[in-house]
Image (tube, rainbow, N blue to C red):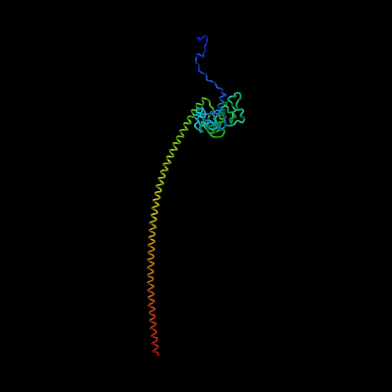
Amino acid sequence: MGCDGGSIPKRDELVKQKQRKAKVDQNILNRVHWFSCALSKKALSSPVVSCGLGKLYNRDAILEFLLDRTAYGDGDVICKHIKSLKDVVTLQLELNPSFSEAQSASLTNHDQEPVSRYICPITMKEMNGKHRFVYLDTCGCVMSEQAMKEIPSKTCIKCAKPYEAVNVIVLNPKAEELEAMELALAEKQARIAAEKKEKKKAKASKKELESMNGADSKLLDSTTTSSSKRKLDEATTTDSHKHKKQHTTTTTTTTATLSSTHSLTAAVAAKVAEQMAVNASRQKSSAIQSLYNSGRVSKENFMNR
């Protein structure tokens, strides 16, 4: 049939079939996603952060990546949506009291069942990939999805901080969920960028308006100062005129008073002089009369003899 000496080809060698997807052991995937950092591939250790796609990272690895985006080979593929620490949330994880380093996950030892370092604070279930876990990007609290369904509330059942449905992020979601989360994250980042742009524009407008108001205020202050200075000068000039007028009036009054005083003094002096003259005249007449009287007495005395 093959004309090569009796070889018989199989059907799959003659008919092209759709390749089957290679099956990956779910236990290995769980150990990779839930026990190690998605960026550095090292074991998860506090502080642990998560992005809007629900991936788990060590905070130290994210800091190294932000400082040097070439620090990890596939960093630009895994963390292309992380631009700063604002794009990740520090998780509030509940430690598992039964955890020990000897029971930590290992990618080489598949026989040993790993014990998770963290558990749900409500249901006490381990965060090992067998149960769905979520976190709230408002507070970072982590709990199992079952706990949220059993205790429906508009506030976090761990810290009582309010949240909405959009604030619930699934940790390590399925492939079909990841696509929707990527779309929602892109929309969220675009909305945040638009809000920042609007705030920046409003801030610039406010600053420009304040600058204009400041210029107007300075102009008004200058005008007010000039007007006040002019009024002050006018008031000073008026006061000066009033002072001069008052001084002139006072001088005139003083002069008139002195003149009147001098006139009165002259009149008194004249009167005194006149009185003195009269007194002197009287004294003279008295002396003459006394002489006359003395002679008469002497004559009478002579005749009487």
Residue 160 percent location from the top left of the image: 55, 34
- Which residue occupies the foreground of this view, 287 or 48? 48
Q: Residue furthest bottom?
A: 305
Q: Give the quarter of the figure containing the C terminus.
A: bottom left
Residue 193 position in % (x across, y down): 46, 33
Question: In the rendered image, which quarter is residue 112 located in?
Answer: top right
Give the mark count. Answer: 0
Q: Percent from the top left, x then y, of residue 230?
A: 39, 51
Q: Quadrant of residue 152?
A: top right
Q: In this rendering, is residue 107 above or below 288?
A: above
304 w.r.t. 220: above or below? below
Residue 145 at x, y percent in the picture: 56, 28
Depth check, front residue: 92 or 48? 48
Q: Residue 45: which quarter of the image?
A: top right
Q: Is residue 278 above or below residue 190?
A: below
- Residue 219, compared with residue 156, is above or below; it is below
* Foreground of the two, 165 or 280: 280
Looking at the picture, tell me which residue is in the foreground, 258 or 104. Answer: 104
